[in-house]
Amino acid sequence: MGQLGWHIDLGKCTGCNACAIACKTENNTPLGTDWRQVIIQEGGIYPNPKRIFVTMTCLHCEKPSCLKSCPVGAITKRASDGIVLIDQDKCVGCKRCTWACPYGAARFIHPSIPNP
Ligand code: SF4
Ligand code: SF4
Ligand code: SF4
């Protein structure tokens, strides 16, 4: 089984958000639904505070908790490259995958139902 992944040097990230904006533009996601987000973590000790930026999206996990949580088998992992896919026709909108994903990556889009 193949397993694609992201290779990101967080030491170089300046938190500019260009990747998040590019993703939103490319996928035309609605307001409030961002498939890529840049998370800010603060640390360090005064007088040397630190800010760390983490660009986050679906990681196509080796053992996806979203896949295990889906009651109707709408989420699968493609054997050839490890990409995690969602069959929109099978999805019944229960939102269990959005609660199961430890990275907050699984998003639910419905005009009248907000994300958690
Ligand atoms: S926020 Fe995204 S585009 Fe900007 S520096 Fe970090 S990884 Fe690159
Ligand atoms: S949605 Fe979350 S749990 Fe599922 S593959 Fe992506 S990162 Fe992993
Ligand atoms: S919202 Fe859809 S894809 Fe997510 S767990 Fe429920 S049925 Fe599966």
Image: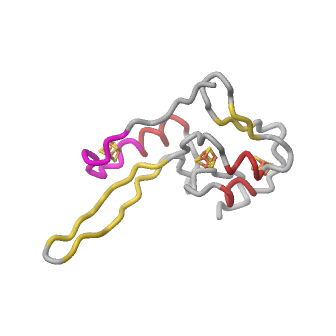
* Residue shown at 58% from the left, 49% from the top: 30
In the depicted structure, whether residue 21 falls above or below residue 87: below
Q: In this view, which residue lies farthest toward the bottom?
A: 46
Residues in magenta, as a range: 8-19
Tally of marks:
0
The answer to whether residue 11 is magenta is: yes
- Where residue 69 appears, as percent x and y from the top left, is 76, 53
- Where residue 88 appears, as percent x and y from the top left, is 77, 38
- Where residue 50 appears, as percent x and y from the top left, is 23, 65
* Residue shown at 59% from the left, 42% from the top: 61
Q: Quarter of the image containing the C terminus?
A: bottom right
47 horizontally vs 69: left or right: left
Location of residue 99 by image quarter = bottom right
Residue in the foreground of this view, choosing between 85 and 18:
85
In the depicted structure, whether residue 109 falls above or below residue 112: above
Q: Quarter of the image containing the N terminus?
A: top right
